[in-house]
Each structure stands twice: as structure tokens, then as C-alpha cells.
Amino acid sequence: QVHRRLLCDDNRGVGEALSEPGATGQGLVVRGRHLVLLDPAGSAAERHRPLAQELVLAPYAVLVAGEASSLSRGRQEFSALRTELPPNVHLLTLAAEDDGNVLLRLEHQFERGESVNGSQPVTIDLL
């Protein structure tokens, strides 16, 4: 647990103590989750980068009140890919723009030399 409360100003710009007493008066408490991966330095990125993407960008359920929504009546899944993206490429953005164009941003997940297999250059055919 991390308690967020300072009794004195920490001189970091706000000019006052951080006093967030919370509902109980004992201060706000932040709880987190820590994962420890024990891998050699040369191959650690191959596990921690995809795992971080999976944890941070995990899908979540959205519930809609009322009768069947337009989502449930239409297609709920679509892929314009002929083949799966390589494991070291991440789809960062896929967004329709007002002018009818589509913004597609892909990113390479690994730095040069960070991973034995993952750092290799990738070519993707967008046609």
C-alpha cells in the first residue's frame, strides 16, 4: 500500500502539504500490482514488452442499458489483415478520420539490440 499524505510542504510547486484525508480520515491509499520476471537481460524484453501491452491494453466489458444496442446488431469483430502482424509489431492506432481516410500507426516493440529475435527489422505489406 502507498499512503498519499504529507504533513509538510515538500517544496514541489503547490505551496502546501498534500493532505487528502479520504473518507476515513486516515489518508488516501493506492494499491497496485507488481510482477517480477526473472529472465536473462538479453531476452527479458521478449517477455516484458508483450506482457506490459497485454496488461495495460486489456479489453474491458462495456454494458449498455436498454434494448439491444447498435453494437449487438452489427458486426462486433473485424480484421482487414490478410495475415497476422509479426509478434514484434504493435498496432498503435487505427482510427477513421472525418475526410474518409484511416489513420494507421504501427510500432516496433523492441529497441535495436534489446532482443535477440524481436529486434530484427520487419517489413509489412500494406496492400
Image (tube, rainbow, N blue to C red):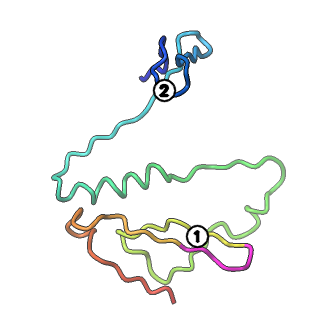
Q: Is residue 78 shown left or right of residue 10?
A: right
- Tell me, yes or no, whether the two marked residues, 2 and 1, touch with CB atoms within 8 Å: no
Q: Is residue 24 above or below residue 29?
A: above
Q: Which mark identifies residue 126?
A: none
- Percent x, y for residue 110? 31, 64
Q: Nearer the viewer, residue 115 or 72?
A: 115
User: How far across and how far down the image is residue 108, in percent?
Assistant: 38, 69
Residue at (27% x, 41% y) in the render = 36
Residue at which label 1 appears:
94
Residue at screen point 19% across, 50% down: 39
Q: Is residue 80 above or below residue 62?
A: below
Residue at position x 45%, y 20% from top?
A: 10
- On whether residue 114 falls in the magenta region, the answer is no
* Residue farthest right in this picture: 67
Among the two numbered marks 2 and 1 on one chain, the one whose residue lies closer to the N terminus:
2
Q: Is 77 positioned to the left or the right of 87 in the image?
A: right
- Quadrant for the N terminus in the image: top left
Viewer-side residue, 118 vs 70: 118
How crowded pointer 2 is (Cα within 10 Å; few <14, some 14-19, many 20+) is rated as few
Q: Amino acid at mark 2?
A: Val
Q: Which residue is mark 2?
A: 30
Identify the magenta region.
98-104
Residue type, mark 1 in image: Leu
